[in-house]
Image: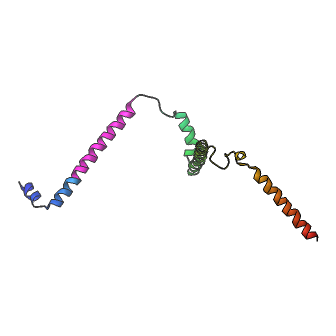
Amino acid sequence: QSGDILLSSLPASALFFLTMVFSSALFRNSLRRATVVGSRRAQSTKGGAVVPANILSGWYNIFGKSSAGYTSWLVIGILVSEAATGWGSDAIWNSVNKGKTFETVDWTKFKTEDEDDDEDDDEDDDDDDEEEDDE
């Protein structure tokens, strides 16, 4: 009965807060239990390792033992991943936009005979300029 009196004397906002705190704590505990049980089941199932132990120990001996080795592993991995991602995205971009970019447009379709006349006119103008300079 003393617990009922204590709870009834609290304001509604405090009761709401206490309910939320305790319910979230119960939810976290049950979630934690489910995660631990699930991971134990996953460990106990028989199946081969994703990466064989000799490869992992070789990787550790080369890259994992020192900070410098691990840092070089990260830098090399980042550079290779960036190059592969860049190459892949460029390949996709070029295949989707074939014929729409400056490099892939067939410029012979746009050639007109007027352009040849313009060039001849330019050469004539140059010749006229030279004759004026000679005088």
Report which quarter residue 92 is drawn in: top right
Q: Is residue 27 magenta?
A: yes
Residue at 76% in and 53% down? 114
Residue 34 location in percent, x, y?
30, 39
Q: Residue at x 44, y 28 (%)?
A: 47
> Horizontal placement of 25 versus 12: left or right?
right
Is 60 contained in the magenta span? no
The boundaries of the magenta stretch are 21-45
Of residue 110 and residue 19, the one placed in the foreground of this image is 110
Q: Position of residue 37 (x, y in %)?
A: 32, 37
Q: Which quadrant of the figure contains the C terminus?
A: bottom right
Task: State the image quarter where residue 97 is shown.
Answer: top right
Residue 20: image location, x then y, percent: 22, 53
Residue found at the far right of this picture: 135
Residue 21 % position (x, y)? 23, 54
Which residue occupies the foreground of this view, 54 or 87? Answer: 87
Marks counted in the figure total 0
